[in-house]
Amino acid sequence: MTQPLLELRGVAKLYSQGSGLRALWPGGRQQQMALAPTDLVIPDGAAIGLVGESGSGKTTLSRIAAGLSRPSRGEVDWQGTPIEALDPEARAAWRRELQYVFQNATAALNPRHRVRRILHITLAGLWRGSEKQRDQAGRHERINEVAAQVGLGRVLLDRYPHQLSGGQAQRVAIARALLGAPKLLILDEPVSALDLSLQAQILNLLVELRRDLGLTYLFISHDLAVVERLCDEVHVMHDGRIIEQGATAEVLSNPRKSYTRRLLAAVPRR
Ligand SMILES: Nc1ncnc2c1ncn2[C@@H]1O[C@H](COP(=O)(O)OP(=O)(O)OP(=O)(O)O)[C@@H](O)[C@H]1O
Ligand SMILES: [Mg+2]
C-alpha cells in the first residue's frame, strides 16, 4: 500500500473545565473528553467526509489533523513522519501542502486589504526563503492562474472582503488555500453558511478542483447530502468518537448505527 498523506493515530483531546477559585479546589477542575482516542487515515486522492451533530468533535478532530491544535494524546503523521519530527524543509512543505478552509470565509480574510493584496501576502509568505521570493511577475501570474481556477474575475480581486457575498468570499478563501499548490484541503463546514444554490456552486467547484488538480479532501459537514456530493468515504462522529465509517453510498443507503439513521432522517436528501 502506498503511504497515506495524513494519518492520525490515537489522537484525543481533553479540555479543562472550570475556572476561577473552583479550579483551585481539589476536583474543581474537570476534564472534558472532546475527542476520544481516534484513528483516521487519509490516503492520497481520497475525499473523506466527517459528519455528526453539533458538538460531536468534528472541528476538534479537523484542527488536530491540520496541526492547528495539539492533541492531548496520540500522533499525527504527514506522509509517514510525525509532524513534530519533520525537518525544516519537510515542515515548510507540510505547511504549504496542507491547507485549512474555515467556515466563515469573510471573517477569515483581512478586512483592510483588497482581495488581490490578501492573495499577494499569502503567496509572499509561501515563497519566502525560496528562489521565487523576489519574483513579482511570477506572483502576479500565479494569483491570476488561481483566480481563474476558482472563477474570481478582476472586479472581485479589486474588492475588499466586506464587498463580497458569502459565496464569493468562500471562493477567495479557496483560492488562497490553492496558492501553494496543496495536496490536502481540510474544509470545516465550508458551505454551511451559504444558501442552497451557492452551496451547489461551491461544491461543484470543489468537485472540479479535485478532478483537475488531484486534490485530497477532508470535508467536515453536518449535512449528509453535501457529503454525498463530494466524498467517496464518510466517517460519522458522535460524542467525540467515530462510530461508523465506510463508502459514502454504503453508509447512506445502509447505515448500521441508529445514530446515523437519525442523522439521515434529520436532513432532507436532495
Ligand atoms: N476550546 C474549548 N474548550 C473547551 N471545550 C471545547 C473547546 N472547543 C470545543 N470544545 C468542546 O468540545 C466538543 C466538541 O466540539 P467541536 O467544536 O469539535 O464540535 P463540532 O462537531 O465541530 O460542532 P459544530 O457542528 O457545532 O461545529 C464540544 O462539547 C465543545 O463544547
Ligand atoms: Mg465545528
Image: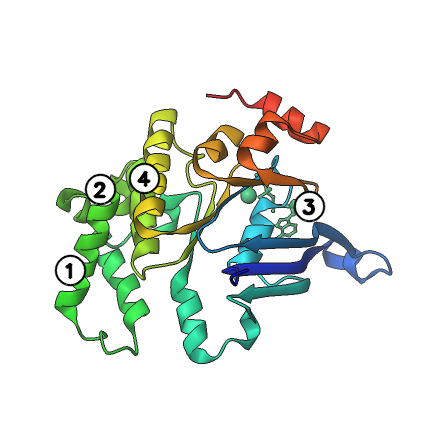
Q: Where 47 sits versus 77, above or below?
A: above
Q: Residue at x 50, y 66 (%)?
A: 79
Identify the image's colour scheme: rainbow, by chain, secondary structure or one colour: rainbow
* Mark drawn on residue 205: 4
* Mark drawn on residue 151: 2
Percent across and percent down for residue 61 are: 59, 51
Amino acid type at mark 1: Glu
| Label 3 C-beta lies within 8 Å of the nearest ligand 1 atom | yes
Instruction: Name the residue nearer the viewer: 259 or 110.
Output: 259
Q: Where 68 sits versus 263, above or below?
A: below
Question: Whole-Å distance between the Cαs marked 3 and 1?
Answer: 44 Å
**Can residue 119 be seen at all in this image of the molecule?**
yes
Q: Residue at x 27, y 64 (%)?
A: 123
Q: Earlier in the sequence, mark 3 or mark 2?
A: 2
In this rendering, position of residue 129 left or right of residue 71: left
Which residue is under mark 3? 240
Q: Residue furthest right?
A: 26
Amino acid type at mark 3: Gly
Q: Is disc 3 in contact with disc 2, using a CB cutoff of under 8 Å?
A: no
**Mark 4: few, some, or many residues within 10 Å (few <14, many ≥20)?**
some
Q: Is disc 4 in contact with disc 2, using a CB cutoff of under 8 Å?
A: yes
Residue 200 falls in which quadrant of the image?
A: top left
Percent across and percent down for residue 32 are: 74, 51
Q: Is disc 1 in contact with disc 2, using a CB cutoff of under 8 Å?
A: no
| Label 2 C-beta lies within 8 Å of the nearest ligand 2 atom | no
Question: Whole-Å distance between the Cαs marked 3 and 4?
Answer: 30 Å
**Mark 3: few, some, or many residues within 10 Å (few <14, many ≥20)?**
many
Which residue is under mark 1? 141
Q: Where 248 sits versus 158, above or below?
A: above
In this rendering, position of residue 159 left or right of residue 103: left
